[in-house]
Amino acid sequence: MKLPGMRLFARSRSRDFENDTKRREAVLAQIQKEKLSIVSEIDGLSRRLSEEYERQAILLDSSEEYDSRAVEDEHLLVDAERVSRQVASRLETLNAELAVFSRLEGLVLSGDRAGTA
């Protein structure tokens, strides 16, 4: 008996492996690009935050004691502290994002090893 329609053929394993590898490589390249972007942002923010802390320390050293400090100096310090907290929060977020992308990278790499087995 003859079945109607086309017969099903499996592609070669090497072709499947090549396609799977190309997909993983594309995903891995994008993950690595995003990780570099995150690291760059972390480095820049960390450097600027460190510089800001140095400026705040200089202002504190050159300013009067808290109870006799000029109102303008106090406003500068309060505003600088607020912005520093925002930057520190952003750094925490970026580090969490970096951890997520690192886990994704590990998953893609482990899938790559599984594909070669």
Image (cartoon, rainbow, N blue to C red):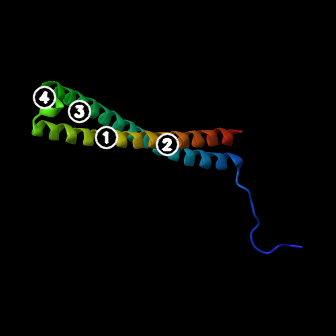
What element does badge 4 sit on? loop
Between 57 and 65, which is closer to the camera in this rendering?
A: 65
Cα–Cα gap, marks 4 and 2: 44 Å
Please report whichever mark, 4 or 2, sits nearer to the chain's N-terminal start. Answer: 4
Q: Which class describes the residues within 10 Å of circle 1: few (<14), some (14-19), or many (20+)? A: few
Residue at which label 1 appears = 85
The Cα atoms of the two marked residues, 3 and 1, are separated by 11 Å
What amino acid is at disc 1?
Answer: Arg
Residue type at mark 3 is: Glu
Task: Report the disc number at residue 63.
Answer: 4
Q: Position of residue 8 (x, y in %)?
A: 75, 63
Looking at the rendered structure, the kind of residue marked 2 is Phe
Q: Earlier in the sequence, mark 2 or mark 3?
A: 3
Mark toward the viewer: 4 or 2:
4
Instruction: Determine whether 48 is above or below 21 in the image.
Output: above
Looking at the picture, tell me which residue is in the foreground, 9 or 70: 70
Residues at marks 2 and 3, CA–CA distance in whole angstroms: 29 Å
Report the side of 7 relative to 99 (left or right).
right
Query: Which quadrant of the rendered structure holds the N terminus?
Result: bottom right
Does residue 36 lie above or below 11 as drawn?
above
Identity of the residue drawn at 34% across and 39% down: 88
The residue positioned 74% from the left and 60% from the top of the image is 9
In contact (CB < 8 Å): disc 4 and disc 2 = no
Where is mark 3, residue-wise? Answer: 52
Q: Are marks 2 and 1 in contact (CB under 8 Å)?
A: no
Q: Earlier in the sequence, mark 2 or mark 1?
A: 1
Q: What residue is rendered at 41% in x and 43% in y?
A: 93
Using the rendered image of the protein, determine whether residue 87 is visible from the camera's viewpoint: yes
Residue lying furthest front:
67
Residues under numbered marks 1 and 4 in contact, where contact means CB atoms less than 8 Å apart = no
Which label was assigned to residue 101?
2
Relative height, residue 23 to residue 3 (above, below): above
